[in-house]
Amino acid sequence: MHKQSCKLEVAFDDGAVFSLPFELMRVYSPSAEVSGHGPGQEVLQTGKRNVEMVALEPVGNYAVKPTFSDGHVSGIFTWAYLYKLGRDQDAMWEDYLRRLDDAGHGREAGRDLSMTAKSVGGHGCA
């Protein structure tokens, strides 16, 4: 967990290494609160630009459970889901930005920073 860059780095046995932004993980949390109980029940997450990961706990040998700075603690990220997030993060990020725009929201106040930009002042996530 890299708190300064606001990313979780995950390496897999096949050699794949992914750097997952905390914001991406938060807005695509596999929890029912975010993803609903089936297709079409997803809840658009807004205002998560500066969310941080404050803790990360193992769940057996199959997953991790992050605690985010906004109090979200119910997502259990399996290794397979983390791999999917890493593999598909560019497309998922663009989809997230499109859904924010369609709903009349920006990441916070618009698409002014890319997913990989650092925040001004060196704290918080941007």
Image (cartoon, rainbow, N blue to C red):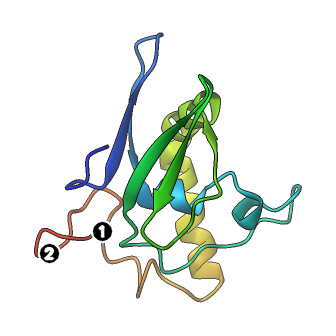
Foreground residue among 68 and 35: 68
- Report the residue at 77% width, 60% height from top: 32
Q: Residue furthest top?
A: 14
* Residue 114 at least partly seen: yes
Image quadrant assignment for residue 98: bottom right
Q: Which mark is residue 26?
A: none
Asked if the residue under mark 1 is in contact with the one under mark 2, i.e. CB atoms within 8 Å, the reply is: yes
Compared with 123, 16 (above or below) is: above
On the image, the x and y values in percent for residue 66 come to: 50, 50
Tell me: 64 left or right of 49.
right
- Report the residue at 77% width, 65% height from top: 42
* Residue 93 at least partly seen: no
User: Who comes first in sequence, dot 2 or dot 1?
Assistant: 2
Tell me: 55 left or right of 91.
left
Compared with 12, 71 (above or below) is: below
Q: Secondary structure at mark 1?
A: loop
Foreground residue among 122 and 63: 63
Image quadrant assignment for residue 35: bottom right
On the image, the x and y values in percent for residue 28 come to: 61, 56
On the image, the x and y values in percent for residue 49 come to: 40, 72
Compared with 88, 70 (above or below) is: below
On the image, the x and y values in percent for residue 115 come to: 36, 59
Tell me: 36 left or right of 26.
right
- Identified by mark 2, the residue type is Val
Q: Secondary structure at mark 2?
A: loop
- Report the residue at 44% width, 61% height from top: 23
- At label 1, counting other C-alpha atoms closer than 10 Å, the crowd grade (few under 14, some 14-19, many 20 or more) is many
Compared with 123, 23 (above or below) is: above
Q: What residue sits right under mark 2 in the picture?
A: 120
Q: Which mark is residue 126?
A: 1
- Report the residue at 48% width, 80% height from top: 47
